[in-house]
Image (cartoon, helix red, strand yellow):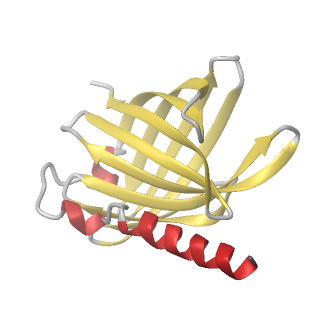
Amino acid sequence: MRTLWMAATLVLSALLMSCSSEINDYAGTHPQFELDEYFNGELSAHGIVQDRSGKVLRRFSVDMTGSWQGNKGTLEEDFIYDDGEQQRRVWHLTKTAEGHYTGTADDVVVDAVGQTKGFALNWRYTLAVPVDGKVWHIDFNDWMYQLDEHRVLNRADMTKWGVKVGEVTLWIERKH
């Protein structure tokens, strides 16, 4: 029975992995998403957190300020949730090569690694997330799509031990 369960898990994992997007799928699309250009200045965002069934758990807004000096950047994020909770995250970003980025923040336990192609950015990291009085390390597979020079749509799958536990959807807009 255990062997059957393991085989079924491997087949299901292979099927799910074959259905996922890859950053190279977006090569040649426009506008060209450059993290250091888009996240430079003041931005605002609105989003939702959903559980694995799709039920909305939280709504939130974010004020962001990004600044860059050469290949080093800082992105300050101030979150306000619908229940009044406030959070602050400060990202320390580095452009390591054309279209390649890394990032750290106090609650990021596995550094973020990202790559852009065309209008898309894929950003992966592990975040320490408080859940019912405990802190869980949740893996984020973040996809950002730059729709135009002012707007980005962000969708992130959240997993724990390879199992989807939720997702975040976020609309980001540059302040004029």
Residue at 45%, 63% in the rendered image: 16
Residue at 66%, 77% in the rendered image: 4
Q: Is residue 16 left or right of residue 118?
A: right
Most extreme residue toward the bottom, as rendered?
3
Q: Quadrant of residue 23?
A: bottom left
Residue at 58%, 66% in the rendered image: 111
Most extreme residue toward the right, as rendered?
133
Q: Quadrant of residue 98?
A: bottom left
Labels in figure, total = 0
Q: Is residue 149 left or right of residue 139?
A: left
Q: Is residue 156 left or right of residue 126?
A: left
Q: In x, y percent, where is residue 113?
A: 47, 67
Considering the image in quadrants, where does the N terminus appear?
bottom right
Q: Foreground residue, 92 or 165?
A: 165
Q: In x, y percent, where is residue 155?
A: 42, 43
Q: In x, y percent, where is residue 15?
A: 43, 68
Residue at 27%, 54% in the rendered image: 120
Considering the image in quadrants, where does the C terminus appear?
top left
Q: Quadrant of residue 162?
A: bottom right
In the image, is residue 16 above or below residue 41? below
Q: In x, y percent, where is residue 119?
A: 21, 52
In the image, is residue 7 above or below residue 167? below
In the image, is residue 90 above or below residue 3? above
